[in-house]
Image: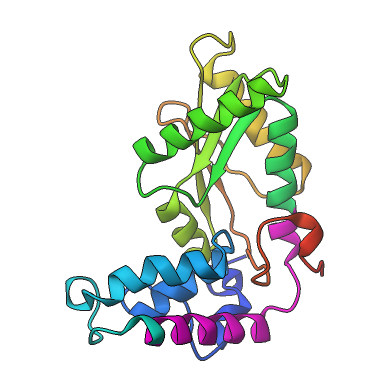
Amino acid sequence: MDRESSRGRYFNGAFPPDTVTFAGAIALKVATGVDQRDALVEGFTEIGAEMSSFFPEPNMRPDEVAHLVDLVIRDHNAQVTTASREAIALLEAFDAMTIAGIVYSFAEGGDTQDVLEDIGISARTLVDHGVAVRGYCFAHAGDADELIMNGQLALGYGIFAEAGSTPEEIGKEVAALLREQGLPVRPHLSAEQRIIVGPMIYEIPFTGMDLEDIPEP
């Protein structure tokens, strides 16, 4: 699968994802499917008020931002009516990681430090529910953007000091869980603690991250 064949159907719509326009940035987040509509409106309203600092478009009022978000969601769902096999496989692999005691974070946080803070909170919640947490796996927001734009996902991984596992063991287990779902996984870079998944087509209708809510292919 080359780069062109790993591009999702959302690129066929009126608002394709990109990294250089305001509408394209909204489309990127809609394609990832993590944030709810109101969260998107809130976040992009702040950007729209100071547009010149980020994008070439003129400033937008809150109601204009909300209208644009709704247009992008509607356009996305007109193109992506069912989830791709690879998207379902990735989400199921994340579920399997949780069961195995590996905390995951997907498309959250602007950098690794932000993600690790969120992972720490999630880990404590799992421990409180009796899960033996051994390690973690993550893709921050920029990694998720790369998945949408270029069809590959970089996953970081690591351990909690008191868990007893090594980073290498967690990395191999994460890779194995991804492969069990039929996803293409390149040999992971143990020195950088990154695993590359892809090429793949990640497509989900904008309904949230719960598997039961996503129409399968």
Residue 58 left/right relative to 171:
left
Residue pictured at 41% horizontal, 26% vertical = 191
Q: Position of residue 74 (x, y in %)?
A: 60, 85
Residue pictured at 73% horizontal, 68% vertical = 83
Residue 206 left/right relative to 114:
right
Residue 73 left/right relative to 120:
right
Q: Is residue 44 above or below residue 69?
A: above
Q: Indicate the quadrant where residue 64 lies.
A: bottom left
* Residue 19 seen in the figure: no
Residue pictured at 48% horizontal, 12% vertical = 161
* Residue 36 seen in the figure: yes
Q: Is residue 211 magenta?
A: no
Residue sitting farthest toward the bottom: 14
Residue 112 left/right relative to 153:
left
Q: Position of residue 185 (x, y in %)?
A: 62, 44
Q: Is residue 182 above or below residue 60?
A: above
Region rendered in magenta = 64-88
Quarter of the image with the N terminus in it: bottom right
Q: Is residue 105 above or below residue 73?
A: above
Quarter of the image with the C terminus in it: bottom right
Q: Nearer the viewer, residue 136 or 146?
A: 136
Residue pictured at 72% horizontal, 55% vertical = 210
Q: Indicate the quadrant where residue 101 lies.
A: top right
